[in-house]
Amino acid sequence: MSIFDIFRKRKDIPKPWSKYYTDEEMDIKIPNISLYKQLKNTANKYPDNYAYRYLGKNVTYKKFINQIDKAALSFKEMNVKKGDVVTFCMPNIPEVIIGFYALNKIGAIANMVHPLSSEEEIKEAVVSTKSKYLVMVDIFYDKIKNTLKGTQLKNVIYVSPSNSMNLLLKVGYKLINIGKYKKFPRDKFYMSWKKFISKSIFSKLVITEKYGKDTPAVILHSGGTSGKPKNVVLQNRAFLMAVEQEKIFLKYLNVGDSVLAIMPNFHGFGLSVCMHSTMSIGFTSILVPQFDARKFDILFKKNRPSVVLGVPTLFEALIKNDNIKNLDLSFLKMAICGGDMLPKILEDKVNNYFKEHNSTAKITQGYGMTEALAAVCLGIADINKSGSIGIPLPGNNIKIINPSTRKTNPYNVVGEICINTKALMMGYLNNETETNQALQIHDDGHVWLHSGDLGYMDEDGFIFCKGRIKRMIITSGYNVYPSHIEEVIQSHPAVLQCTVVGVPHPYKQEVPKAFIVLKEGYFSLFVKNEIKEYCKKNLAKYMVPKEFIFRKKLPKTKLGKVDFKKLQSDVGADDV
């Protein structure tokens, strides 16, 4: 029985935003099927339409389903069963979505990990989820070769980004990267994607299992409300519901339109909105393995996307790209910003830019959490208020509470944003304590996700985000948790104390800055580079502090706590 079916006597939730939807849209239904089945239903309707595009190569729905079916048979041949976990550590290349759906077809779970994670973070992601296999991009072999043989993994399946390129690009890629990366050893532990797929050729297995909306589908990673990395378990229902919601907020688009998938597969918004929902409706997902702001003009000219979804830094890069000034953007119909708050000045600049370049699109904001599969509320077309993060999508509910009393705040009063939806996570894997802190049953009988974010709701149901209760840093759209960085730095033998704060950055919005107190006998001149390298080894690239400042002591508040606000404005040099 689902957590959503346990409590029968519930009070109605006020929904002032309902006036912007029809009764049918508000009464959203979740089909009891798998994600694979949902995609296949679309493929049966549009077999010759393009499901995805990768570096100029178009793949039809018919071919895509065939690719998935082969991978599903290969996983079955390797004895992957319902409930088993397979970890993916790859950028947005076709093999990651092929593998994702293949696992879903057989009832297994995909564990999506950032490929720029440190070797220890990748190992932890594998061990904590008891993954049977790791599917990873081949260029990171050097990073993981010494960490994975002590795990429960049966095999590592490695994939080259060039596998799915057209012949010309494939040759170019190999010439450019010749000698750059070490090849995987030829032993039974490592297996190429080509060898993996070949297992399906002579397979006599028949896949007949059918899975529904309550089957676990994916594990994504989040710091939750405490900032410590956690494994978020999401069922099919979360993705199935997102498709029904996307049909509503993308209703101005037509089958065959395209969505630029810059947001990565290990991000809820990327995997759900840019990939699964996009392809399950009949749009084309344009897979972008690596975003380069300097080549934004080329990306737009070649792909002519109907929809662009990204973080504020992406849109900042768009309007600053000198090569794109004369580009006709009449093909662009929608632009959605998420991952961080969109400053009003940037919103105005982007909208003016679109207008000057013949696009009718107006940028809107969205808001969500991994624990609710990313998209919770959104500014939709002409249903939007400047500065807001939109209204809840149909089937989602939001209320603003007083964090101390859990009582619902009146309209226009700032409090904690709480979320209720059938897309809520099952919980954090093997972490009941943190799950119970995040998912709480309120007096109204409903289960609410506590976001840790501050905001208010107006009388029309529009939500305005006002900051974070937790000390989370958002850099280029990625969530960075100071406590995690502090823990790593403080594990260095020379460090006595460390505090990390977020400081403004002209392009990334914020970057981490570390203030460090060394143990007696150590001096910054001798250990600064050592600590930097230590961070590079044990933290994902985007988590490594931009600056390392060494202090004799850290400033404190009257209550004896570290004064974070004072550190954020501290621009002094080392004093030890």
Image (cartoon, grey):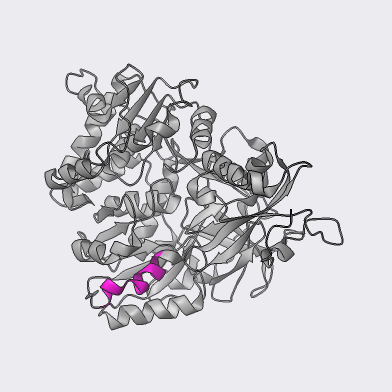
Which range of residues does the magenta coloring cover?
314-325
Is residue 405 rendered magenta in the image? no
Say above or below: 39 vs 284: above
One can see residue 368 in this view: yes
Residue positioned 29% across, 34% down in the render: 159
Image quarter of residue 217: top left
Image position, residue 99 (x, y; %)? 31, 35
Image position, residue 139 (x, y; %)? 34, 37
Q: Could you tell whether 430 is left or right of 203 in the image?
A: right
Residue positioned 77% across, 41% down in the render: 521
Image position, residue 89 (x, y; %)? 40, 38
Residue positioned 66% across, 49% down in the render: 525
Image position, residue 297 (x, y; %)? 26, 67
Say above or below: 292 vs 464: above
Residue 91 vs residue 335, the one in the foreground: 91
Residue 513 vs residue 236, the one in the foreground: 513
Q: Could you tell whether 124 is left or right of 98 in the image?
A: right
One can see residue 483 in this view: no
Q: What's the magenta bit mostly, secondary-structure-wise?
A: helix
Q: Could you tell whether 221 is left or right of 257 in the image?
A: right
Residue positioned 71% across, 46% down in the render: 523
Residue 68 vs residue 553, the one in the foreground: 553
**Numbered circles on residues, count:** 0
Say above or below: 75 vs 241: above
